[in-house]
Amino acid sequence: DAGVIQSPRHEVTEMGQEVTLRCKPISGHDYLFWYRQTMMRGLELLIYFNNNVPIDDSGMPEDRFSAKMPNASFSTLKIQPSEPRDSAVYFCASRQGLNTEAFFGQGTRLTVV
Amino acid sequence: GENVEQHPSTLSVQEGDSAVIKCTYSDSASNYFPWYKQELGKGPQLIIDIRSNVGEKKDQRIAVTLNKTAKHFSLHITETQPEDSAVYFCAASNSGAGSYQLTFGKGTKLSVIP
């Protein structure tokens, strides 16, 4: 397996634009997580899914953020409209079952200007 | 919810010396404690983990200890090498509460000086 695959690796967009980040988890993993990493706040959990169903989205900062998982092999995180303070590295991770290793993707570095 | 504190935030050691990173957690029900290493431009990668039914685990130059009474756990790296330079994150998780999320510490930037 190629691991967790995220796209794009880098995204630069203007304030007010819509941004969509994509993630393909490892095949067979039933949990998918979206994290945001900044210098100030470290790694923050935004939302996670179990068997494609959103379980906890309490970390999503605002209504401008939304996430979907239409099937077991694909998830998106959307920001609409984007703001400069959304600039961060966004990671997707997947794992199989309880208390097992979470595998992270390479991340998407988002810059909103 | 769970809160994980990690210290120090930066650590510099001479090559060959040992490095110790400490974490405390707040939720006494947490039962899984992984450590991740993040190299520049990459995602975090698991290097070792420990579950609440053991007090210590070792894997070559890396060891983790857990004190459930005091709610703290530590990462020990012996005979450090330049390639150990990275950011290290501790995390805690409680599967018993039906919430399977990992709560991460803020990270420790380790620099190994040749």
Image: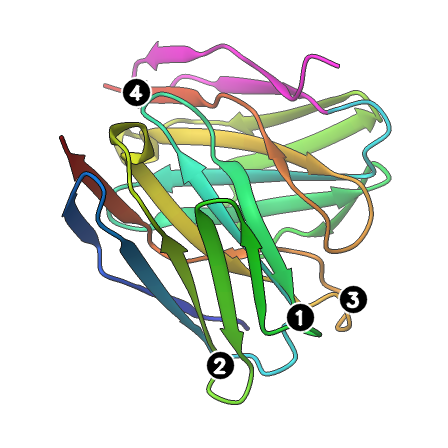
Q: Nearer the viewer, mark 3 or mark 1?
A: 1
Question: The residue under label 1 is which amino acid type?
Answer: Asn
Q: Nearer the viewer, mark 4 or mark 2?
A: 2
Q: Which mark is residue A111?
A: 4
Of B112 and A76, which appears nearest the observer?
B112
**Residue A81 locus on image (x, y percent):** 43, 27
Q: Are marks 1 and 4 on the same chain?
A: no
**Residue B106 locus on image (x, y percent):** 33, 54
Marker count (numbered): 4
Of B64 and A58, which appears nearest the observer?
B64
The Cα–Cα distance between marks 3 and 2, rounded to whole angstroms, is 20 Å
Hey, which quadrant is residue A37 in on the image? top left
Density class for disc 4 (Cα within 10 Å; few <14, some 14-19, many ≥20) is: some
Question: The residue under label 2 is which amino acid type?
Answer: Lys
Q: Are marks 3 and 1 on the same chain?
A: yes
The Cα–Cα distance between marks 1 and 4, rounded to whole angstroms, is 36 Å
Name the residue that disc number 1 marks: B31
Question: The residue under label 3 is which amino acid type?
Answer: Gly
Give the residue displayed 49% in from the left and 61% down from the top: B64
Hey, which quadrant is residue B84 in on the image? top left
As for residue A5 lying within the magenta part, the answer is: yes
Q: Chain of mark 3?
A: B
Question: The residue under label 4 is which amino acid type?
Answer: Thr
The Cα–Cα distance between marks 1 and 2, rounded to whole angstroms, is 11 Å
Give the residue displayed 36% in from the left and 28% down from the top: B39
As for residue A59 lying within the magenta part, the answer is: no
Q: Which mark is residue B98?
A: 3
Q: State whether residue A61 appears in this view.
A: no
The Cα–Cα distance between marks 4 and 2, rounded to whole angstroms, is 38 Å
Hey, which quadrant is residue A20 in on the image? top right
Q: Chain of mark 2?
A: B
